[in-house]
Image: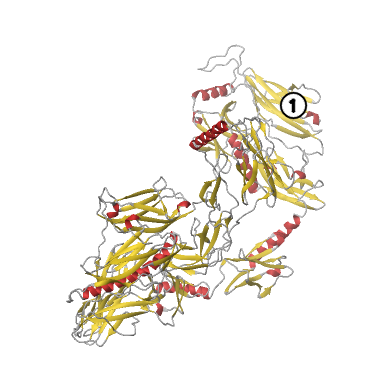
Amino acid sequence: MYILIFCMLRAPEGMQEYQRMAAHFGRDLVQLQHELHRMKVATKEKDYPAEVPKAPDFLVSLRSHTVWEKTPVKLFCTVSGKPNPIVKWYRNNVAIEPLSAPGKYKIENKYGVHSLIISRYDLTKPSKLHFHKGVLSCILFPLLSGIHPSKLEVTLLESFGVTFGTEGESVSLVANMVVVPDLPNLPPEAMWYRDDTLLMPSRWAEMSIGGGVAKLTLPHLNKDDEGLYTLCIWTKDGTAEHSAYLFVKDATPTVAGAPGAPMDVAVFDVNADYVLVSWKPPNTTHEAPITGYFVDRSCKLLYVDVMLKVLFCINKHLIYSCLVYVTIPDPPTNVHATEINKTYIVLNWTPPSPRGRAPVWYLIEKCVGDSHIWQRVNTAVQLRSPRFPVYDMEDKKSYRFRVITVNKYGSSEPSEPTAAIQKVDPYGVPSAPGQVIASRNTKTSAFVQWEPPKHANNLMGYYVDASLVGSKKWFPCNHRPYKHTRFVVHGLVPGDTYVFRVQAVNASGLSEESQDSAPFFIDAALSTPSAPYGISLLNCNGSSMTLAWKRPKNTGGSKITSYYLDKREAESVDWKEVNPSPAAHRTFMVENLTTGVFYEFKIQAANLAGVGLPSEPSKAFACEAWTMAEPGPAYDISFWEVRDTFVLVQWKPPVYAGAGPITGYFVDMAKKGSSDFVAVNAEPVGHCYLKVSGLETGASYVFRVRAVNAKDVGKASDVSDPVCAKALPGTKEIVCGVDEETGDIFLNFEACEVSETSKFTWSKSYKEITESSRVSITSSGRNSKLTFVNAEKEDLGIYSVAVTNTDGVSSSYSVNEEELKKMLELSYNIKHPIVPLKTELNYEILEKGHVRFWVQAMKLSSSVNYRFIVNDKAITSAEGYKISHDASTGIIQMTIEHFTKANEGTYTIQIHDGKAKSQSSLVLVGDAFKGALKEAEFQRKEHIRKQGPHFSEYLSFHVTDDCTVMLVCKLANVKKETTFTWFKDDEEIPVDVPPNPMSGSCSLPIPMFSRKDQGIYKAVLGDDHGKDTSVYDISGKVFEDIINAIASIAGSSASDLVLQCTPEGIRLQCYMKYYTEEMKTSWFHRDSKISSSEKMRIGGTSEMAWMQICEPTDKEKGHYTIEIHDGKKSHSRTFDLSGQGNVQMCYMNYLLSVDRGRVVGGLPDVVTIMEKKSLSLTCTVWGDPSPEVTWFKNEQEVVSDDRYKITFEGGKFASLTINNVYVEDSGKYSINVRNKYGGEFVEITVSVYKQGGDIPEPKLGQMAKPVHSIRNSWIPGMSNPAPGESLSCRV
C-alpha cells in the first residue's frame, strides 16, 4: 500500500492554523475510540464463540494529504485480523525507525487505530509510504544497552504560551513535565528550536532541564529573537513537542519618533580591505519614513592579528614564488564590474604580472561619461585586494573606471578604462501585497492571510500591522520580517473589532501598505459544542419524565440552537432517539415511557458548526409517579455578578410543586471539595435569587437549593458547579446617568468581555424585561443602555444585566427614591435648559464716558441669539449703541457712547442658545444712576483733558532725608512751548530754577516746613493745545500727614539727650535734623507727662527740642524722656538726672550766677522796623556790684554819637537808641553785661525794611549761649580757683 504526499512551502509559524485541522481529525479518532470502548464494555459479559483466524485487512485505508512544509502530518488507518496483525510503516521502501530520527516520527496504536505522526515535514521529493502486514508474524527490534533518555516516558503538562517581550528585557520559556522513571542523573534530552533552527546554549540562550521543568532563558532580548519556539523532548515513543510564538517589540526610543533597530545584520564578501554589511529594515507604523542608516564598527584585536598573519604569509609566498624581479609594477588588467545595484558597484581586476618585489596597492580613478577628467576614489584607503566597492555615484550618470598599481618605487600606468557603468536598482522595493483576509483563531488572536505582491523583487518578508476600528492608530503585530503569507496575530482584545494591513520588505526598503482588511471581530474559531452534562430528573408522572441538563462548558463560539436526546432502558445497549425534533431549551418532557422501567439518557448539543459530542449517560431514573407532599428539586443554578466577596445565586423553581404552592427557598453552600453544607439564609426567600456575601476572595464554593411548601422542605437540587469568588479582570458596574442632549435617565453598562453572538439581557428584580412601555434598551458593541421613557416611583427597584456567551459578565444597580429624585431634577434642567451665567448683567464706566453693560455666560455656542431691552424697548446696534459678543469667553455686551439722563431705567438681556434660555436685568435709577452719570461725565472730561498737556499724576508730597517737603507731579503730552507755574493761595510762587515740563515731572521744595506753610497750592500747565490744573490743599489731614512724615525722619535722627547748665537752672536738649513746634513731642519725668510751666519750660529751635528746669531741687532728680510721635510709632530718648555730681555742679552755677552781671529782661530776639523810624533797644540788667554794659553791632563795639545814643541809668536800665534807621542798620546787635562775678552776652537781630515794602517774615533765631564767668568766690565742698582763672560750667 502506498501513499503520495505533496508538500508546499510553509514555515513553522503557520503551525497553529493546521494544529486545528489536526485537532479536528483527532476528534474523529477520539469519537471512534469512545464508540469502540463502549461496545467493548457492553459486550464484555456476553459469551462469544472461539476466535476464528482471519487474514489481516485494512478496514480504513490511508488517504492522500496535501500539507504545508514544516507542519505536522498525521496519517491514520484501521486494520483487522485474528490474531491482531502487526503493522510496520515504510517510507520509500525503507522501514521507519522512530529512534533513528528522534522527534521526527511518532507511531501510535490505540484500539486497532494505527497512526503515524510526522513532525516538521521537510520539503523534499514526494515520498511514498506503505505498510507490510503479515499473519501471526512478530517483528523484533534490537534493545539499546543501558537506559537512554529515549526510554523515558515524558508527558508535557503546563507549557509556555504566546509570549510578548521588549528589546533589552529578559524572558524565560518554561514547560512542566512528568518523567517516568524520574532519575536525577538521567534527565530527559531537550532540544529548543527557533523557526526550525536548533539553538545551542550560549550567553544569549541559557537552557536547563531537571526536576520536571525544561527552561529556556533569553537574558537580553533582541528583535532577532522573535519567532516560533519549539521544545522537543525525546520520549519512549519518539518525541513530545510544544510550540509557541515569542514577539519582541521595539524598546522605547531615546528620541520620540525615532525608528526601531534594524535586525539580522550579516557580513559577507570579507577581504583584507572591506566587508559588505546587510540588514533588514525595522517596521514603521506611526514613525516617520526611514531616510538612512548609520553603521558602527568595532575592531577585535584577535581578528586583526589573524589578518596580519595571513597578509604576511601571502606576501612571503609571493616573494618566494616570483621569478622576475622588477621595481615599478605593471598596471592591472581585466578591470570590470562584478556587482551593480542602486547603492554601489563592485570592481574587480586581475593583479599585474610581474608586480615587483615590494608590496603593492591600488588606486582607483573614475570619470563621468566620456570626459577625461579622472578623479581619485580611494583617497583614504590603501587598497591591497583586487576587489573594491565604489559608492557616491549620482543617479542617472554613467562612469568609467581605471586602476593604477603602486609600490614604494612608484606607480604603474593606468589600466584600460572600463566601459561606461551606471548604477541601477535590480530589484527596487516590492509592490504592495494583495488582498488581506482575517479569520477566527482564538479569543485573543486572529489568523491573517494575504496575497503576495506582484513584484516580489528579492522579498525578505512581511510586516503585519493592526488597528482598532475607529482609533486610526496602527500598531505592529510582528517586529521581524515574516517570510510567509499567513500569520497568527496574538495579543488582541476579545470582543474588539480590528482591521489589518501588510507591508512587504526587501533590502531596498518597505513597500506601500496593502489595502486594509475588512473589519474583523475577535472571537474564538467556530467548532461544535462540547457535551452537555448534569442530567437531572425534575418530575415523573409514571408515563413521562421531565429532564433538565446543564449547558455545555464550551459552546464552540456560536449560539447553541438545539439539543438531541437519546434514551435506552438500563439493561439495554441500544440507544433510541427520544424525538425526531430537537429540543430548543434545556428542559424536556420525555413521553411514552413504561411505568417501573429504569431509563438512561444522553444528550447532544448543536450549533452552527454541527452536532457536538454526546454527554455521558445519565444515571438510571425509575419511571414511577411522584406523589410526595414536599416539592421537587429546584434546577439550573447559575451564578451572576461574581465579585471578590459576594455572588448572586439564581435558580429555577421546581417543576413538581408537591401538595401545595411553593412558599420559599433555602440556599446551602460549602467550599469546593467539602460536603459540609451550611444554610445561607435562616428564613426562606420568596424569590428565585439570593445575593450571598461574606465570601473569601479567591475561594471556590458550591451551592444547592431546597424548595419549601406548606408541608415540608423539599428535595435538594443537584450540587452546582463550583464558582470562584473573584471578579473578572476589567469588570465594570452599571452607571446611572442623564443624557446631556435629551435629558433621559438611563442605566449604562460596559462589558469587559463579549463575543460575536453575545446579547445583553436586562432584568428588573431579576425578571427578564422582554417588552415594556416604561423602558427602552439599545446595545452596541460592548455597551448596552436601558433608558427610562418617563421615570417615576413605579420604576424604583433592582435592575440587572447579563451578557450571554461569556464567563458570567453581569452587574446590577438599585434605583432608590433619593437617587431618582436627584436624576429627575437633573433631567428637568436638561429638558428645560438655561444658559448658566457666570455673572449677572452689570455695568462699568469706560474712557470717553462710555458706559458698557455686559453679562458673562459659562458657555456659549457660535449660534447664540440675544437682545437687549431698555425700558421695555428692544435695542439694536445703531448710532450711539454697540452690541457684540464673544463665544469663546461667553461675554455679551452693549456700549452706550453718550450716557445722559435719558438713559435712566431698567436694562434687560434675553439669551437663546439652542434649547437653553436665560435672562438677566439691572435697575439703574435714583442714586445709583446719578453716581454712574457723574462718573461718566467725569471720564468724558478726563478724556478731553488728556487731549492736551495734562497731569498724569496730580500733586502729592514727599519728605526728603533733610526734612524738606517736596510737592511733586508728573506731566504728559507736553512740548517745548508748554508752560508750568506754581501758585499758593492764588499768588504765584517765585522759584529760583524755572520748571522743565519736558522732563515729565516738576517739584516745589518747602524747607523748614511749619504751620505758616499751610495753604492751597496750585500747579498750572498749558500751551496752545489746552490747559490743566492740579490743586493741593495743605491743611487738615494733609498738613498732619506732612508733619508726621517730618517727625518720622527727625525722630529717627534724634541724638541722645544732653544736659546744659544755664543761669536759670538745668536744660535738657535733643538735637535732630529738623524740629518744629507742630511735631507731636512729649516730655516725661518718671513716667509722668510734663506740661510747660514757670518751673518746667518746653521749647525748641530748628535744630533741637529742649526742656528748661528752673531753680532745680532734689525733687527734679530722676529719669527724663522725650517722645516724638510720627503717627505710626514714637521715637524716644532718655536721660538719668539722678547723679549727685550733675545736680551739684548745676546748683553751684545757679548760686554763683545770683550776683553776676546779667540781662534780666526787656530785649527781644528779633526786631523788625520800617526805614526812617527810631529804634530803642532797652533792657533791665542786674549785678552786685553794678555791672558794666557794652553794646556791639556785628561784633563791633558801638560808640555813642548823634545817631547812636547809649544810656545806663540807676545801674539797672541800659538802652541803645538809633535815630532814623536805614536798611544798612540791619544786622546782629548784642549787649555784654559784666561785673567781677561774671557776665552775660545777649544777641538781638534787627531787620530794617523800606517804606511800602513787604515786612520780612521773622525767623526763629538761635538761642543765646552766654558764657558765665565766676571770680574770687568759694562754696563749701568746692576748692577755690586759682587767681586769674575763670570758672565756667557747661554740661
| Residue 1182 falls left or right of residue 836 | right
> Tag count in the figure?
1
| Residue 889 falls left or right of residue 231 | right
Residue holding disc 1: 1216
Graded by Cα atoms within 10 Å as few (under 14), some (14 to 19) or many (20 or more), the crowding at tag 1 reads many
Picture residue at 41% right of the left edge, 60% below the top = 121
The amino acid beneath tag 1 is Leu
Q: Residue 539 lies in what quarter of the image?
A: bottom left
Which quarter shows the N terminus? bottom left
Pinpoint residue 199: horizontal percent, then vertical percent: 40, 50
| Residue 1102 falls left or right of residue 485 | right
Helix, strand or loop at label 1? It is: strand
Furthest residue in direction top, as rendered? 1283
Residue 555 vs residue 1153, the one in the foreground: 555
Pinpoint residue 558: horizontal percent, then vertical percent: 40, 74
Which quarter shows the C terminus? top right
| Residue 963 falls left or right of residue 258 | right
Pinpoint residue 721: horizontal percent, then vertical percent: 28, 70
Query: Taking 1194 as reference, is 367 above or below it?
Result: below
Q: Residue 702 lies in what quarter of the image?
A: bottom left
Query: Taking 50 as reference, is 1264 above or below it?
Result: above
Residue 722 vs residue 1221, the one in the foreground: 722
Pinpoint residue 863: horizontal percent, then vertical percent: 63, 71
Colour approach in the figure: secondary structure
Asked whether residue 1242 appears in the rendered view, the answer is yes
Asked whether residue 1210 appears in the rendered view, the answer is no
